Image: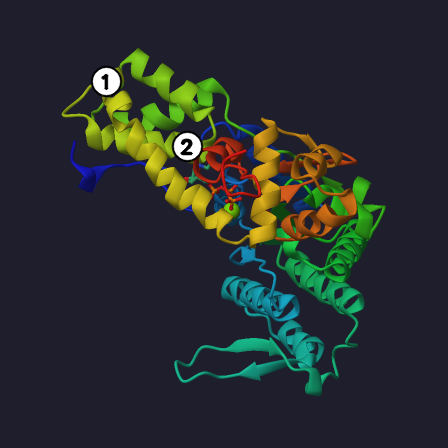
Amino acid sequence: MDPDVNPYSMGAGNPPPALTGRETQEQQFRTLLARLGGGLSDRSMIVSGLRGVGKTVLLLEFEGIAKDAGWTAPRPIEIKSDTDFRSELADAAYQALLQLSARKALGDRLRSFAGLLRGFKVGAPSDGSLEFSFDPDAVSGSTGDLERDLTNLFEELGQTAREHETGVVFLLDEMQFLARGELEAVAAAMHRMSQTKLPVALVGAGLPQLPGLMVDAKSYAERLFAYPKLGALSEDAARQALVVPAAAKGVSFEDDALARIISESGCYPAFVQAYGKEAWNHAPDSPIRDVDVLGAESLVLAELDEEFFHVRFEKATDREREYMAAMADIGEGPYRTAQVAERLGRRPSYTSAPRDSLIKKGLIYSPDYGQVDFTVPKFSPFMRRRYPLRDDDGTSA
Ligand SMILES: Nc1ncnc2c1ncn2[C@@H]1O[C@H](COP(=O)(O)OP(=O)(O)OP(=O)(O)O)[C@@H](O)[C@H]1O
Ligand SMILES: [Mg+2]
């Protein structure tokens, strides 16, 4: 059928035509806003899950929910290994202020904020928009200590928001890439918010190691945040994710076709979208049949190899690739690190460096002590298919 009107969304962070199966998390978020807005305390959220389960699009959904609830929500901040967190936060705080002042003139508050933000340089680019970025030479309203500054900033924002009968929610994506000191600062600032019951919420999203990193940073983070985990969709939610967007265009699926997508995709959102998209393109007309899904399958796999798996693989060095090939060679995870070392014929001391750097890069994580697993669902069959473990003489092991 016509690819021009194909409703399915492929690609990281692209909102799906129907976001399904996340009602619990959405409700939890609504409750959080309602309670904080009513002067009660509640736990902010740290959402974690594997690659492609829908963390980014859930944050975008939260942004919309917050705005509908009359809250102020700056755009989600995507943390990268080289992100200047302070300056990104300053930008977000500034966006929040602008949104707040659009509701009601800020007057005196804005002036007191200027004092607080004195440590942040104001630049006026030629397009006339204002931009805040941290200027280490102009620290006067800022102490230079991130934990203290962030706490002050949130407190000030929270009080301003409360006076305007609203709240501010910060959304942080790929939060596992924050440095330890930055995680400590976030926890400390949110701790203060919970003590003062100010309407500032935070939702962080990241890979499965994120909750552990957070609690390592500040032990009280365990009780301070709620830690919802995102996984594959339920079969019913996966079915809805396929059927609802098609129905909106007068297209239906035969039951066999749906059943095949559900089983082949494992109900992982990214794979569900990929199958939906290619089955649509492959089908001559409605309904989409099982043969269409079968016919689309090789294209789906080729596309996923390139767009979902290979981009991750490319981030790894030769030694890291060898480590991942050894993991995959064992079968399905989780893997004992000692077993991976054994498969490589190396001492564990040799393999700890590639393991640690793979964890830092977000390609693998440690689900339990002495264990590792891939952060990308179905990565091990990809490795076996495309990059099998080789013997020293270059042949497949
Ligand atoms: N609840 C859902 N229902 C239907 N489709 C979804 C859902 N959640 C995510 N998707 C789709 O799955 C794909 C992956 O979503 P997203 O990029 O948000 O995942 P992610 O967890 O942020 O992945 P990564 O860790 O790689 O950043 C997108 O195409 C998105 O539209
Ligand atoms: Mg994402």
Q: Residue at x 54, y 47 (%)?
A: 66
Residue type indicated by callout 2? Phe
Q: In front: 159, or 188?
A: 188
Vertical position of residue 75 compared to residue 143: above or below: above
Q: Residue at x 53, y 67 (%)?
A: 98
Q: Secondary structure at mark 1?
A: helix
Quarter of the figure with the C terminus: top right
Residue 356 shown left or right of residue 52 in the figure: right
Q: In front: 385, or 201?
A: 385
User: Whole-Å distance between the Cαs marked 2 and 1?
Assistant: 18 Å
Residue 258 shown left or right of residue 393 in the figure: left
The location of residue 13, given as percent across then percent down, is: 45, 47
Q: Secondary structure at mark 2?
A: helix
On the image, numbered disc 2 is attached to which residue? 271
Query: What residue occupies the far front of the structure in this picture?
Result: 393
Vertical position of residue 249 compared to residue 184: above or below: above
Residue 277 shown left or right of residue 358 in the figure: left
Q: Residue at x 50, y 37 (%)?
A: 388
What is the total number of numbered labels drawn onto the structure image?
2
Q: Which mark is residue 310?
A: none
Residue type indicated by callout 1? Val
Query: What residue occupies the far bottom of the structure in this picture?
Result: 137
Quick check: is the Cβ at mark 2 less than 8 Å away from ligand 1?
no
Q: Residue at x 46, y 25 (%)?
A: 267
- Report which quarter residue 84 is drawn in: bottom right
Query: What residue occupies the far top of the structure in this picture?
Result: 255
On the image, numbered disc 1 is attached to which residue? 291
The location of residue 171, given as percent across then percent down, is: 59, 52
Mark 2 is surrounded, within 10 Å at the Cα level, by few (under 14), some (14 to 19) or many (20 or more) other residues, namely many
Q: In front: 144, or 364?
A: 364
